């Protein structure tokens, strides 16, 4: 059952990718040049990245009696801090790759700092 689900999910993702890549060729140029579509196109990569980060936050493993020197709390705080920094850097630079690099560096740096100084 798992392999059939994996095959279905892969085919569904391939279909969605194909449709989203082929759709601009089928839509008239007049519609593609609308300002709201340009704004959507600019904000879509950041929106997807934020959603992926939010769904991967590690808050499920937090115990009820959490203390500040808990490594799970440090990871969650590093993730939230990195997400805020990514949003700030993207707002300033409008460069998704730069924001991703800053986010990866920030999550590792913040986790290291929190683990080192608060454990």
Image (cartoon, rainbow, N blue to C red):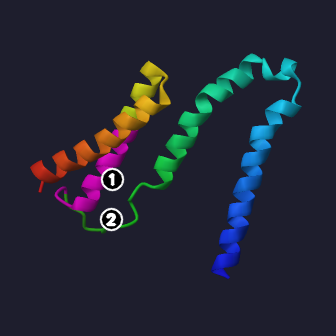
Q: Position of residue 37 (x, y in %)?
A: 73, 24
On-image quarter of the N terminus: bottom right
Secondary structure beneath label 1: helix
Q: Position of residue 57 (x, y in %)?
A: 42, 54
Query: Is 11 or 51 nearer to us in this picture?
Result: 11
From the viewer's perspective, is residue 71 above or below residue 93?
Answer: below
Name the residue located 68 percent from the left edge and 73 percent from the top edge.
Answer: 5
The magenta span reads 68-83
Q: Within the magenta stretch, is there residue 73? A: yes
- Left or right of 12 on screen, residue 39: left
Residue 90, quarter of the rendered image: top left
- Left or right of 11 on screen, residue 84: left
From the viewer's perspective, is residue 12 above or below residue 80?
Answer: below
- Neighbour class for label 2 at 10 Å: few (<14), some, many (≥20)? some
Name the residue located 16 percent from the left edge and 58 percent from the top edge.
Answer: 69
Q: Within the magenta stretch, is there residue 107? A: no
- Neighbour class for label 1 at 10 Å: few (<14), some, many (≥20)? many
Residue 3, quarter of the rendered image: bottom right
Q: Is residue 84 visible?
A: no
Q: Position of residue 79 (x, y in %)?
A: 35, 47
Quick check: marks 1 and 2 in contact, CB under 8 Å? yes
Give the residue pinned by disc 1: 76
Q: CA distance from mark 1 to mark 2?
A: 9 Å
From the viewer's perspective, is residue 5 above or below residue 27?
Answer: below
Secondary structure beneath label 2: loop
On-image quarter of the C terminus: bottom left
- Specify the principal SS of the magenta part: helix
Name the residue located 36 percent from the left edge and 33 percent from the top edge.
Answer: 85
Query: Is 104 or 43 nearer to us in this picture?
Result: 104
Name the residue located 41 percent from the left edge and 29 percent from the top edge.
Answer: 98
Give the residue pinned by disc 2: 62
Tell me which label, 1 or 2, sits earlier in the chain.
2
């Amino acid at each position: 059952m798992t392999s059939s689900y994996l095959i279905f999910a892969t085919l569904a993702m391939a279909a969605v990718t194909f449709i989203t890549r082929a759709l601009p060729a089928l839509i008239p140029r007049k519609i593609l040049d609308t300002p709201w579509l340009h704004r959507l196109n600019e904000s879509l990569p950041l929106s997807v990245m934020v959603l992926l980060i939010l769904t991967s936050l590690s808050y499920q493993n937090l115990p009820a009696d959490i203390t500040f020197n808990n490594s799970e709390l440090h990871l969650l705080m590093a993730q939230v801090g990195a997400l805020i920094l990514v949003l700030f850097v993207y707002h300033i630079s409008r460069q998704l790759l730069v924001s991703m690099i800053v986010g990866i560096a920030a999550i590792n740096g913040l986790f290291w700092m929190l683990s080192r100084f608060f454990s």
